[in-house]
């Protein structure tokens, strides 16, 4: 079973690359949406396709046609980078216009020399519930998202 997850990064391509390298993914710094395959160690028979995009105008235009086909979407931002926090609002607008299954994920890696206090507001779904915000490791966050998707997909059958 394939699960498709879009990770929309509001970080710069360089910071996105540094974060993904920590998890063994080779992210190329260019204006494209990159696909990675990951097999969760605890999940037999499940393969995850990670589609990673940055907030470049070309990537956001392309990702709007890709988002409706994703099983889940994650807005990934750096909590101490002012530009990343500013782009969160635009990223959420893009995701909310195309899908309902959205989570936010904050990182503080790599440590920046010029840090600021996070200004990312809380986001709510159409029913008034706060959207899930993750702060842990990428793999652990993805496992929670996969579990949530599998439990929802099971009840819909």
Image (tube, rainbow, N blue to C red):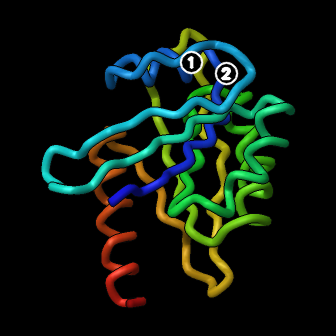
Q: Which residue is mark 2?
A: 12
Residue at the image point whose x is 52% and y is 34% from the top: 35
Across and down, in percent, residue 4 comes to 48, 53
- Is any atom of residue 117 visible in this view? yes
Q: Quadrant of the C terminus?
A: bottom left
Tell which of 153 and 89 is nearer to you.
Answer: 153
Across and down, in percent, residue 60 comes to 79, 41
Across and down, in percent, residue 122 comes to 62, 62
Tell which of 140 and 53 is nearer to you.
Answer: 53
Residue at the image point whose x is 65% and y is 32% from the top: 33
At numbered mark 1, what does the secondary structure look like: helix, strand or loop? helix
Q: Residues within 10 Å of mark 2 (few under 14, many from 20)?
A: some
Across and down, in percent, residue 143 comes to 29, 54
Q: Is there CB contact under 8 Å for labels 1 and 2?
A: yes
Numbered mark located on residue 15 in the image: 1
- Does residue 21 appear to the left or right of 46 in the view shown? right
Query: Could you give the CA–CA distance between mark 1 and mark 2, rounded to whole angstroms?
Result: 5 Å
Numbered mark located on residue 6 in the image: none
- Does residue 46 appear to the left or right of 142 in the view shown? left
Tell which of 114 and 6 is nearer to you.
Answer: 6
Q: Residues within 10 Å of mark 1 (few under 14, many from 20)?
A: many
Tally of marks? 2
Residue at the image point whose x is 58% and y is 37% from the top: 77
Answer with the quarter of the image where residue 138 lies: top left
Picture layout, residue 58 above or below residue 21: below
Answer with the quarter of the image where residue 95 lies: bottom right
At numbered mark 2, what does the secondary structure look like: helix, strand or loop? loop
Picture layout, residue 71 above or below residue 11: below
- Does residue 121 appear to the left or right of 26 in the view shown? right
Residue at the image point whose x is 67% and y is 35% from the top: 10
Answer with the quarter of the image where residue 117 lies: top right
């Amino acid at each position: 079973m394939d699960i498709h997850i879009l990770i929309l990064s509001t970080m710069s391509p360089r910071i996105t690359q540094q974060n993904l390298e920590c998890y063994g993914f080779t992210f190329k710094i260019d204006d494209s949406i990159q696909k990675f395959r990951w097999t969760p160690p605890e999940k037999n028979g499940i393969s995850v396709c990670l589609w990673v995009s940055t907030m470049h105008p070309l990537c956001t235009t392309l990702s709007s046609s890709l988002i409706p086909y994703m099983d889940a979407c994650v807005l990934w931002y750096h909590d101490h980078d002012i530009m990343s926090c500013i782009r969160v609002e635009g990223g959420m607008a893009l995701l909310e216009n195309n899908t309902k299954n959205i989570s936010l994920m904050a990182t503080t890696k790599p440590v920046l020399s010029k840090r600021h206090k996070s200004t990312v507001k809380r986001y709510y779904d159409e029913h008034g519930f706060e959207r899930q915000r993750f702060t842990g490791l990428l793999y652990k966050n993805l496992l929670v998202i996969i579990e949530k998707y599998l439990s929802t997909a099971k009840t819909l059958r």
